[in-house]
């Protein structure tokens, strides 16, 4: 019989600008450029999917790298997106990923993942505020009508 294992709950990475208000896609894009694009693990030639944890006042608690992909995709499941949000006691989230092509137009897969995450968030009572696709500029999937 296997002995019980210990688990350590760790906070998601402290942000460079803790407490910043993330209430528009412009601010999320600025956060990406200041914190994600400058991270050691970030490679602009690969897709990176990141979740920003937000409190009830829409202030950022932290962010978590969900996955690094390849040139044109990154695998994302609700489990990896919502786990750090639950641990951080976040009330909402902004999900973001980059397109190495620098064209921020959402793909069909982006739309599908966004809708899947929104449905999962409804069950958990953690709202997905937006899905921002980053390229040379950005595209907000909420303002494009893909989120309720």
Image (cartoon, grey):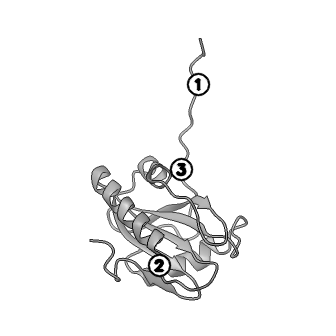
Q: Residue at x 43, y 64 (%)?
A: 113
Q: Which residue is mark 2?
A: 106
Classify mark 1: residues with Cα within 10 Å, few (<14), some (14-19) or many (20+).
few
Which residue occupies the foreground of this view, 7 or 117?
Answer: 117
Q: x and y percent of residue 56 in the render? A: 32, 62
Q: x and y percent of residue 112 in the render? A: 40, 66
**Local secondary structure at mark 3:** loop
Q: x and y percent of residue 138 in the render? A: 50, 84
Q: Residue at x 45, y 51 (%)?
A: 88
Residue 75, disc: none
Does 7 sit above or below residue 47?
Answer: above
Q: x and y percent of residue 125 in the render? A: 29, 54
**Local secondary structure at mark 1:** loop
Does 51 sit above or below residue 120?
Answer: below
The residue sitting at the bottom extreme is: 137
Q: Which residue is mark 1?
A: 5
Q: CA distance from mark 1 to mark 2?
A: 42 Å
Q: Earlier in the sequence, mark 1 or mark 2?
A: 1
Classify mark 3: residues with Cα within 10 Å, few (<14), some (14-19) or many (20+).
some
- Tell us which disc is closer to us: 3 or 2: 2
Q: Earlier in the sequence, mark 3 or mark 2?
A: 3
The residue sitting at the front extreme is: 108
Q: Is the N terminus in the top left, top right, bottom left or bottom right quadrant?
A: top right
Total labels drawn: 3
- Tell us which disc is closer to us: 3 or 1: 1
Q: Which residue is mark 3?
A: 11
Q: Which of the 4 image quadrants contains residue 71?
A: bottom right
Classify mark 2: residues with Cα within 10 Å, few (<14), some (14-19) or many (20+).
some
Q: Residue at x 39, y 77 (%)?
A: 141
Q: CA distance from mark 3 to mark 2?
A: 30 Å
Which residue occupies the foreground of this view, 125 or 114?
Answer: 114
Q: Which of the 4 image quadrants contains residue 137?
A: bottom right
């Amino acid at each position: 019989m296997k002995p019980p294992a210990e688990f350590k709950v760790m906070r998601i990475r402290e942000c460079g600008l803790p407490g910043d208000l993330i209430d528009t896609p412009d601010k999320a894009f600025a956060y990406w450029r200041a914190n994600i694009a400058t991270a050691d693990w970030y490679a602009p030639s690969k897709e990176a999917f990141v979740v920003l944890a937000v409190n009830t006042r829409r202030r950022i608690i932290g962010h978590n790298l969900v996955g690094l992909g390849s040139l044109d995709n990154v695998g994302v499941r609700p489990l990896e997106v919502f786990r750090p949000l639950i641990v951080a006691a976040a009330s909402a989230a902004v999900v973001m990923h980059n397109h190495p092509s620098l064209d921020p137009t959402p793909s069909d897969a982006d739309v599908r993942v966004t809708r899947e995450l929104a449905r999962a968030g409804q069950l958990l009572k953690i709202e997905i505020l937006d899905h921002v696709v980053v390229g040379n500029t950005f595209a907000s999937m909420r303002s494009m009508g893909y989120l309720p």
